[in-house]
Amino acid sequence: MEEAHSEVCGAHQSGPKLHFRIKRMGYYWPTMIKDCIDYARRCQACQFHANLIHEPPEPLHPTVASWPFDAWGLDVVGPLTKTSGGHLYILAAIDYFSKWAEAVPLKEVKKENVADFIRTHIIYRYGVPRYIITDNGKPFAIA
């Protein structure tokens, strides 16, 4: 199976094509189709280069904002090249409804800096949002 799939004669075909190729070579066993599909799915080269659209592990749930400044997305960009002021990171927030962006440069990413940014740049200016969506990185985790 390995030779037919990835060696000199192999072309990294999908499971059903691999099954057909091995069958043409004169081999057969009862679980051949399942084995070929499983083998092709486990092939690292096929996983890396395949142009398949893979289904996400869980269904995606869109975030819908009903009005401006109702839901914000936060993320940290960096580390970047150090600026003359010593800043290495950018903390960015985007409103899901209006796409309005707020951003500040940071020398270091700490929970205190993130909390201060949310308080001064979001809550004081636009009110308390219903949702703040993050990628659960270290500065956004609850201690």
Image: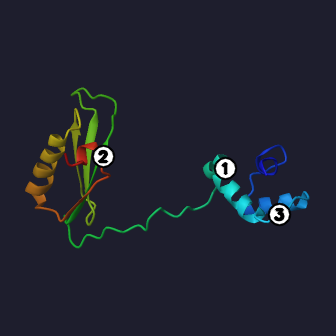
Residue tagged 2: 137
Relative image position of residue 119 (x, y in whole percent): 11, 51
Residue tagged 1: 43
Mark 1 vs mark 2: give the one in front.
1
Determine the residue positioned at 8% across, 55% down: 124
Q: Quadrant of the C terminus?
A: top left
Residue tagged 3: 20
Residue 130 falls in which quadrant of the image?
bottom left
Mark 3 vs mark 2: give the one in front.
3
7 left or right of 60? right
CA neighbours of label 1 inside 10 A, class few (<14), some (14 to 19), many (20+): some
Relative image position of residue 95 (x, y in whole percent): 24, 60
The figure's colour scheme reads rainbow
Determine the residue positioned at 74% across, 52% down: 12
Q: Amino acid at mark 3?
A: Phe
Q: Secondary structure under badge 1? A: loop
Residue extending farthest to the left is: 124
Q: Amino acid at mark 2?
A: Gly
Of the numbered discs 3 and 1, the one sitting upstream in the chain is: 3
Q: Do the CB atoms of the residues marked 3 and 1 lie less than 8 Å apart?
A: no
Q: Amino acid at mark 1?
A: Cys
Q: Is residue 82 above or below residue 140?
A: above
Relative image position of residue 134 (x, y in whole percent): 28, 54
56 left or right of 42? left
Q: Secondary structure under badge 3? A: helix
Q: Is residue 10 above or below residue 59?
A: above
Front residue (pair 125, 55):
55
31 left or right of 140? right
CA neighbours of label 3 inside 10 A, class few (<14), some (14 to 19), many (20+): some
Relative image position of residue 61 (x, y in whole percent): 37, 68
